[in-house]
Each structure stands twice: as structure tokens, then as C-alpha cells.
Image (cartoon, helix red, strand yellow):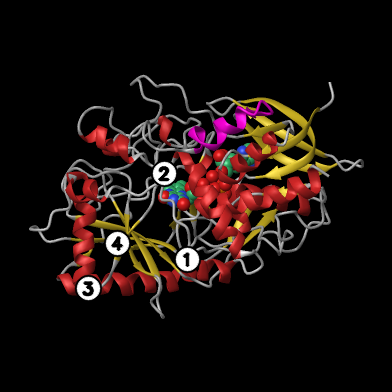
Amino acid sequence: AGPTFVPAVVVGTGYGSSVTALRLGEAGISTLMLEMGQLWNQPGPDGKVFCRMINPDRRSTWFRTRTEAPLGTFLWLDVVNRDIESYAGVLDRVHFAEMSVYVGRGVGGGSLVNGGMAVTPLRSYFEQVLPTVDADEMYNRYYPLANSMLGVSTIPRDYFENSDYYQFARVSRAQAANAGLGTAFVPNVYDFGYMAMEESGQAPKSALNAEVIYGNNYGKRSLDRTYLPAALSTGNVTIQTLHRVRTIAQQPDGTYLLTVEQIDTAGNLLATKEIGCRHLFLGAGSLGTTELLLRARDTGALPALSDEIGNGWGPNGNIMTARANHLWNPTGMLQSSIPTMAIDDWNNPTTPVFAEIAPIPSGIETWVSLYLAITKSPERGTFVYDRATDTMGLRWTREQNQVSVAAAKSLLDRINHANGTIYRYDLFGDTRAFADDFCYHPLGGCVLGKATDGYGRVTGARNLYVTDGSLIPGSIGVNPFVTITALAERNIAQVIRQDIAA
Ligand code: FDA
């Protein structure tokens, strides 16, 4: 049998892919989504689909024999990570030489594992980052559309002020205020009505049960509860899971041919398939999409692709850090896993920082205040394809994160100074106070207007599109998924109008 042919293929099921598949489906285009992870809908032995951050099991991690949590130690003790069976788990940590990147695996991509923080960037910063995109159209139309489709809301003030589960955030807010720093509520896709029912015992706990980076069982509006069911209900979209796209090539007639590996949840190769399509949309995330394009260019399958592919990568200035509080200032044994507040010092003229106040839902009093700082850094990395090993590397040095560490430090030094507190040095596996070797927000690699045209059409190949975080050049100043969603909405509207309907 020859290859299966479908009009449109969308690679991945994260934000960019889900938007694209919904709008193609609505336009009447038969669309196949290919996702390397699994569909997360089967309960495990404990009756839950996802495991907790405390005592994680094989469901937590993508094909490893030990978990790799961002906070790996406590009091320098190896008490956080667990030995597990190798399995198609939901969170992956992809290691490059001097940076590792956390990504979600499964139907819904990063939406399965992220903190749900849904932030629209400052318009002035958006205009700096993506100057060719019509900001009026984004801020009047596509950001509101993305926010409403994703189910974004803000925690009710009353609940935040009174719940024991947000003591950690109130403590950090007060300490920021002592240093003259302001805080802002951060919108989220978590259902706060559900959270209140968790607290009052009327519903099974999820955010209030230490569930987040390995998936939330209830309460979070991940893509498998928003865009993806809407896409499937058009009747034109199907999803194949545990299907990993390995290569893409163009046929003489202009259609695309994909080589796809089907695996089982133990990682065994079940089949290698060929799938053909007319329109190919890449939404495999910054790492996944860039790798497919680099491989295609550098092996000669799509030799006309731009030299810009691989460029413009950045970790959105992500730096994680933590402070130790005084004994009389506990952060609480009960902590919601869903962050809802940030210290907003983005208008600082020398060291702009947007620092989320992050929980440590460990079930014990830790006196730790944790932060994920988003900083503004001009440093960029480059992805390169290595033909000998058929893998993608990242040219990025630890040194390049110095400017981000310095910015985070300048903010947290102020808070420590005002409160007479110090950093925690025991949480990141060694003695560093600043985790500068991993990120949650990989952005770039196939930058809009450089490796593609102004709407994500890949330069040098017709009917080939990029729809995900790889379009954004390395930084967006806040958590990125609302921007990825809004940009995908904008781009697919244009592509359907000009390339497909016509
Ligand atoms: P995304 O990465 O979502 O999806 C890509 C999909 O493609 C994945 O499902 C992957 O398995 C699949 N894929 C990759 N290669 C493939 C291949 N070759 N074949 C088939 N499938 C393939 N952001 C935010 O705004 N607020 C937040 O609170 C957080 N918090 C957060 C916490 C943690 C722990 C992480 C890891 C990340 C976040 N993020 C976040 C980041 C956010 O989740 C991220 O920016 C988006 O998910 C990126 O969306 P994309 O559409 O680019 O790809």
C-alpha cells in the first residue's frame, strides 16, 4: 500500500496546532493531527489519570528511569526525584549541552503540564518583539479571542485573601511591598469555582492536591477541554497519538510526504508509516518544529529552506530562584499548585523582571518563597543539526543567562534586604541560588518574518506553515501561551482566506 493521503496534516497538539486544526476543521478541510505523546484519559491503578508531584510514578516522565523535577533537592537531600519505569509519561526534559527545556508530551502538549498562567503581554513590548504584526488587530481581536477560547479568568479576590492555600503568595506580596515593589494578579485557565469546591470538600482535589507539572486531574482547562474537543466536533479533524513525525519531504507534485513512527507506551516501534498531504502545519513546539525543518533543510529533503531556520532561540529570560523566610513567617503547609500573582517590575529601566510567585506544594512547612522570574535578555541561541547523529543541538552557553540572573538577583536582593532574609542554596541540586540551566518557555527557532513570511508560511517551501512558539523570537516578557494562541489564530485566518479557500 502507498502512503495515506490527507488534505492537511498538523504536527503536534499544543497551542498552535489546536488553533490551526479547529479553524481548518471549521473551514471544511479534512485534517489529521499527529502527536508523539499519548491521549491522557485512562485512569491508572489509583483511579487517577495523572500522578502528583509528591511520589511521582511512570506517568510523570517521558521515557526516563528517574524523574527530573526542576527543584531536585531539599536541604541538599535527594528526596524529590523517584526511580520510575520508562514510559510515555507527560513531562519531558530535553537536555542540550548547557540548557535543558521542559515540554509537555500528550494530546494538549504544554497545556497538560503548565501552570495555566495566561498573560497578555504589554502592548509596547509586543510591538518591540514582533514589529511587523498589526498590534491593533492583535489587541482588539486575537488576544480577546484567545483569552475567551482558552477560558482565562482571574482568581476571585476574596478567595485569594482568605484561603490558606494562598498564604505563600500573600507572604511574598507583603515582602515585595516592604521593598517598594508592586504585585499583580496573574490570570489563569484554572477553574477557580472548582478550586473553591476543592477547598470546601465538595469536589476531588487537584490544584489543592499538588498536581501540576505532571498533569492536573481536574479543574484546569487544558487544550483537551477547550480547542481540541471543538476541533474534533467539526467532524473534519482526527488525532493519531503515539505517532512521531521523523522526516518531511516534498514530492514533485508539490505535496508533502511524512515519515511517521508509531510507538507503544513502552517505546517499542510498532510501525513506520508514510503520510502524504497538501498543506502541512508544524506545531511541534520550538524544539520539535525547528528540528523537523533543520533536518529537512540539511539532509537536502527541502534544500531551499531559509538559513534563518534554527536562529533566534531564547528561554524567555526564565530564571528560578528561592528565598528563605524567618521562622515567624511561614509560607504554609497547604499550597495551591496554581500560581496567581507576580511581582511586576517590568517597567524597571535597567533590569525589567516579571517574577511569578510560585508554590512549593510539598505538604510540609518549608519557609521557602519560590519565584519564576521572566527577564528581558538580548541573548539568543541557535539550533544546529548534526548529520552524523541525526540529532539537533543548541548553541547556547550558561554564560548567556548571566544578564537574566543579574536582573533576577537585583529584584530579589531588594526583597531580601528589606526583609532581612537570604537565598536558599539547597534546592537546585548544587549550591546555586539561581537555576539558570533550564527553562519552561522555549521560544524561537523559526522566527516570524525571518524563517517564514509575516504569517508563518515557511520561506522556500509552498504550503508549509509554522504555527507554534518557534515563531516568537526568544522573549515575550510574560508566560507565552496566550501569545502563541493569539498569533496562531491570526495566522491561520489569513492562510485559510488566501491559500486554502482560494
Ligand atoms: P507545545 O509544546 O505546547 O506542543 C507541541 C506538541 O507537539 C507536544 O504535544 C509534542 O509532544 C508534540 N510533538 C513534538 N514533536 C513532535 C513530532 N516530531 N511528532 C509528533 N508530535 C510532536 N506557559 C504559559 O503561558 N503559562 C504557564 O503557566 C506556563 N507554565 C509552564 C510550566 C511548565 C512545567 C512547562 C513545561 C511549560 C510552561 N509554560 C507556560 C509554557 C507553555 O506550556 C508553552 O509555551 C506552550 O505549551 C508552547 O506551545 P506550542 O504550541 O509552541 O507547543
| Mark in front: 4 vs 2 | 2
Quote the CA–CA distance across marks 4 and 2: 35 Å
**Image point 41% across, 30% down: which residue?**
58
Q: Which residues are magenta?
A: 223-240
Amino acid type at image mark 1: Leu
Residue 435 placed where, x, y %? 37, 60
The residue pinned by badge 3 equals: 179
Q: Nearer the viewer, residue 100 or 7?
A: 7
Q: Residue furthest left?
A: 328
Looking at the image, is mark 2 or mark 3 earlier in the sequence?
A: 3
Marks 4 & 3, CB-CB < 8 Å contact: no
Q: Residue at x 44, y 55 (%)?
A: 119
Figure quadrant of residue 459: bottom right
**Residue holding disc 1:** 122
Amino acid type of the residue tagged 3 in the rendering? Ala
Q: Position of residue 169 (x, y in %)?
A: 24, 55
Q: Could you say which is closer to the camera, residue 397 or residue 210?
A: 210
Write down the residue under mark 4. 431
The kind of residue on which mark 2 rests is: Val
* SS class, disc 3: loop
Q: Quadrant of residue 59?
A: top left
